[in-house]
Image (cartoon, rainbow, N blue to C red):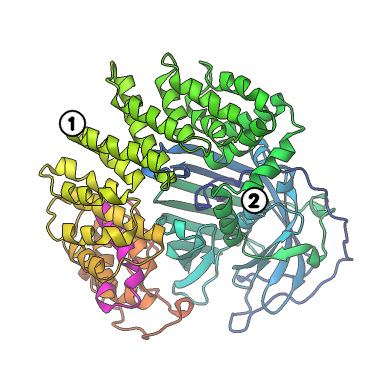
Amino acid sequence: MSMRTLGLGAALTALACAILWWSATSDAPATTPAPQTSAPLAVAGVPDDATFCRFARGETHRFAYSSTTHSEVRPVLPGVRPDDTPPQLSSTELTGALSLEVLEVTAADAVLLARLSGINAQARQLLGDAVEAPFLVAVDARCEVTRVARHKDTPRPVATAHGVVANELAFSVPTGDAPEERRFTTALGVQRALVLAGNEPGQYLRKALAYASRWNPKLLEVDVTDGEVDARRGSSRWFDSLRGLEQVSGGAVQFSKSEWSLQRQPPEAAALAKASRTLTDYVWENPFAADAREEQVTQQGDSQDHQRRVAAMREVAYPMALERFNLLLQAGANINDQWRDMAAFLDAHPQQVPAFVEHITAPDFPAGYKAPAFLALGQARTPAARDALLGLYRERDQQPADRMRSSLALALRADVGAPLAKELKAEALRPAQSPEEAGVSRQAVLHLGVLAGARPGEQEITEEATALVQQLASTARTPEDWSVVFGLVGNLAEGTLLSQVERWTHLQDPEIRQHVPRALRRYKVDRAQPIFVEWLGREQSPAVKRELFNVIHHMYVDANRPVGDALRGEALRHLREQPQVLTRQSLLHILAPYVGTHAEVREAFKRQLVVELEERSGLYSLVAEYLPAASIYQALSTVPGLRAQFGGSLRPELPSTPAPEEVPIGELPLPAADQHPQANLGSAP
């Protein structure tokens, strides 16, 4: 499905259901007008043809709706780098019926009342009864979705889900025989896509190229690797069936694949009988941009949000709270939403902390549910939760994995300090008697860095952490030994250690040196930049350069800044060497902000477009995202095999400043086995 999570930059994309527990909302009073008719919607310049979407007021549509998403995402935890968290698997599904009625037809578009009904149990558990609240969607004569409106009483996460469903209806009818580039709204951002007629009568295809913009800066790393919508007109003036797919990856998203389908059914009057038809009861807005802003506040640990949850939990009994928690876990909700209500419950009922600890440490409690369970303990503000975590951590007969989870949860709390720092340091230096104990010691090192990095002004904690750096560095021998040291420094980001990090960049063993960039991850970019520039000027190891550019990319994304002249030059130089795919991906992200302002970067991207196409690396869409259609056309017209395929019909030039939506690029080439332009461009082998 394409519902987004609140947890990962919201997204993350259309990854999974927006999860929050909401009470049911009552239907608004029915204000059904008498059936009326109006002239079908038409658009100037668009042929008055039945193949285009034309609506009349009062007409109704109903579709069987099915949508699924399978994703693997690294959770975003405060103070912890994504690389230090294990990926979380989730699968979400939404099935039911989507009913629509045309309320209004204007010169621009038609406004349709929409409502989901007969929703499957998983989606209802995740979103509550509000998932069946009405919403509005506007569709123009090209079949493109132009606007979405939520009912004024619909909770924000549910409105986001409705926005996803609304935009999944979108395809587009080309004005001529040639494919055209169009732009579509999705939960990830604004998508550039080719629209073209299919081989069968009444078939229209929308093939994703890349994203022109994202709703949230954290989504810049997420790239579309595959995407298509296939709509069939049939006998109606709209579509009779539609299937869509989008596959993305990048950043914290290891993999996400969403698929959705709609199949026409006979209308059912009862589905919309109680839905309000008063347009002022709805709010027109971008549900994804608003959701992204809201999620940023939530991830920062909004105290007001937590207190509201605590107040709501005061009248909830422990069995009910535990049932809610377990349902969220079983449903595969995003980890950043799974723990919040339980943390609030424990603050409202601290006497229940021992029972909860017993529940999550029982032998039959699934290991895959441990992370959110310990986060609930860690984020509960009652001292009882802190004391329970300390007890678990100090109990040496406890499962090693639970001890490690306890130390991380403690490091993220606000009511711990120097005593915990001393305890973590002692654990880090304790001789291990088994591989499991060695794992606890390594995690103690990293979690001391988390604790110190979150409290830069607490000198005693900083001193414990920096002293541990020196002790571990003096005995480190293997790449694994050094990796833990560099991870501690990277979480700590202590200024006095920067000169030592610079010396580590000269270590002779590249297997050790490739871990050094981790030590710079959380430093301010201005302090780290001179080290990066000097280091890149002499580094020869491809593995080291891969890690270097990956860290540089993420640091500057976090700082919301371009890399500057010196690093831009180094990135261009290394891109010309055509390193491995993961290194190129980081380099392209680093250089992308300069495509519009620096001719040398733009030319490099045009050359790279051909490279990624020929290698089928999956990076084609990333390059194409930052190039105008004219540049894409010019770059691909230089490929000899593609020129021959089209009989030399490729035009050498396009207007220098075309409007993106108006540049026909029907001659864009494709592998010979495919029948539609760009069907396979940018997809993985």
Residue drawn at x 83%, y 65% is 278
Residue drawn at x 44%, y 71% is 179
Name the magenta segment's main secondary structure.
helix
Q: Is residue 472 left or right of residue 368?
A: left
| Label 1 secondary element | helix
Reading the image, the residue beneath label 1 is 475
Residue 676, horizontal then vertical, whole percent: 40, 64
* Residue sitting farthest toward the front: 460
Above-or-below relation of 64 to 103: above
Residue drawn at x 33%, y 51% is 684
* 492 and 82: which is toward the camera: 492
Dot 1 crowding, Cα within 10 Å, few <14, some 14–19, many 20+: few
Residue 678, horizontal then vertical, whole percent: 37, 64
Residue drawn at x 40%, y 33% is 421
* Residue 157 numbered tag: 2
- Nearer to us of marks 2 and 1 is 1
Q: Is residue 24 visible?
A: yes
Q: Is residue 455 left or right of residue 33?
A: left
* 153 and 129: which is toward the camera: 153
Residue 162, horizontal then vertical, whole percent: 65, 54
> Who comes first in sequence, dot 2 or dot 1?
2
Query: Looking at numbered disc 1 in the image, what kind of residue is underneath it?
Result: Thr
Q: Start and end of the magenta stretch?
A: 581-601
Number of marks in picture: 2
Q: Is residue 183 left or right of residue 128?
A: left
Above-or-below relation of 658 to 141: below
Dot 2 crowding, Cα within 10 Å, few <14, some 14–19, many 20+: many
Asked which quadrant contains residue 47, the reply is bottom right
